[in-house]
Amino acid sequence: MAQLLITGGAGFIGSHTCLALLEAGHNLIVLENYSNSSNEALRRVAELAGVRLGDRITLLQGDIRNQEDLEMAFSQEKKTIDAVVHFAGLKAVGESVQQPLRYWDVNVGGTCSLLGAMKRHGCRTIVFSSSATVYGYPKKVPIQETAIVQPISPYGRTKAAVEKLLTDVSESEDGWCIACLRYFNPVGAHSSGRIGESPYGMPNNLFPFVCQVAVGQRKELKIFGGDWPTTDGTPVRDYIHVMDLAEGHCAALEVLMRERPQVLTINLGCGYGYSVLEVVKAFESVSSMDVPFKIVARRPGDVSCSIADSTLAANRLGWVTRRNLVDMCRDAFAWQKDNPFGYFSKND
Ligand SMILES: NC(=O)c1ccc[n+]([C@@H]2O[C@H](COP(=O)([O-])OP(=O)(O)OC[C@H]3O[C@@H](n4cnc5c(N)ncnc54)[C@H](O)[C@@H]3O)[C@@H](O)[C@H]2O)c1
């Protein structure tokens, strides 16, 4: 059992991982500024884990860029923080093109401040949310971790920059235990339907969009390109159930806390891909709802196919995904049906 600081723990991946970490016996301090989330997510996480807020999970409202907020987090109840799981960040590729300064400030500047606080407080273990976007246009699929890092958006460049920063920090001083987890496409929700993805406004990702079309909140799904070099012409992605991803974090943390100091860089994906049309069909079959769609022009910066080589995750973390596309669609739909506006109300 460890005392962990979770940044951005109320977000989509953070909330599901908080649940998995509580279930694994860890105690959590969550530092959140709620810029893209609600504390209702963590209230439900506590309820699912059967713990009281303020007991094994403490919520602190604050920003990773603010030294006072970080001091407050590291000085909570005089407990030493054993490790940090760092989700806080901005994640929309398109928005990052419009607002690069904001993305570099939060994603890179915020991580610098966090690492400074870790150093001051003697904490040298961190799991970082990286992304498959660091690979840019992959030359070979499935993508191995040794593939060239050549991101094509400001968002991807901030993730690649933090990976470099973490390597520099580990080389500057002994003792750092670091995992950069390169997520592929996290989707789905907890099987209870109590926690899930709750995007503000127009979703950026396929699954929340498909869910909102299925329940009639949006007219139709736009598929960007029907002429990609894939079996049905639509882009292929490696979708990973968010609870598999959450378990991947628990596995990475265990390895870091058990082994010698190191920097681990590992893909978290299923190792196989589905086209957008395959996802739509699976979703229709699981939900018994129609998902009307229209094929429109390709988006600049999209890639035809992105699939993880997940061999390293299996070998180094002893972790493999356990949930399939039907589970992803079923759990995403159950969450959407029960929470049509996520954690927010219709007018938020
Ligand atoms: N969802 C994906 O498809 C995906 C894929 C690859 C990597 N990632 C990365 O994983 C992490 C989590 O993603 P998510 O999908 O859960 O996103 P999310 O937006 O749901 O969660 C991020 C959380 O960080 C919080 N946050 C943002 N800026 C903060 C700050 N300055 N201080 C404190 N808290 C702050 C937000 O309020 C939010 O709750 C992000 O770093 C993201 O870049 C996500």
Image (cartoon, grey):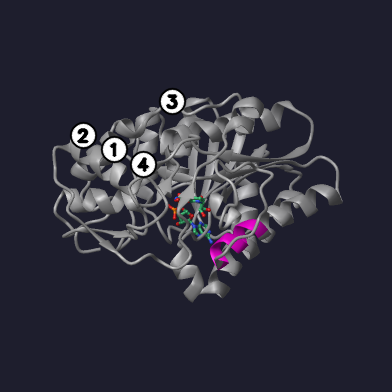
Q: Give the CA separation, mark 4 to mark 2.
A: 29 Å
Q: Position of residue 127 (x, y in %)?
A: 63, 42
| Quadrant occupied by the C terminus | bottom left
Q: Position of residue 265 (x, y in %)?
A: 67, 42
Label 4 belongs to which residue?
Answer: 43
Between residue 347 and residue 80, name the one nearer to us: 347
Q: Residue sitting at 74 percent across and 42 percent down?
A: 124
Is residue 297 found left or right of 309 in the rendered image? left
Residue 315, compared with residue 200, is above or below; it is above
Q: Give the CA separation, mark 4 to mark 3.
A: 26 Å
Q: Residue sitting at 85 percent across and 47 percent down?
A: 173
Q: Amino acid at mark 3?
A: Arg
- Asked if residue 241 lies in the magenta stretch, the reply is no
| Quadrant occupied by the N terminus | top right
**Sequence order check: which comes first, mark 4 or mark 3?**
4
Q: Residue sitting at 42 percent across and 52 percent down?
A: 229
Is residue 13 found left or right of 332 in the rendered image? right
Label 1 belongs to which residue?
Answer: 329
**Sequence order check: which comes first, mark 1 or mark 4?**
4
Label 2 belongs to which residue?
Answer: 286
Q: Position of residue 119 (x, y in %)?
A: 76, 50
Is residue 87 found left or right of 214 in the rendered image? right
Label 3 belongs to which residue?
Answer: 322
User: Circle 2 — which element?
Assistant: helix
Q: Residues within 10 Å of mark 1 (few under 14, many from 20)?
A: many
**Sequence order check: which comes first, mark 4 or mark 2?**
4
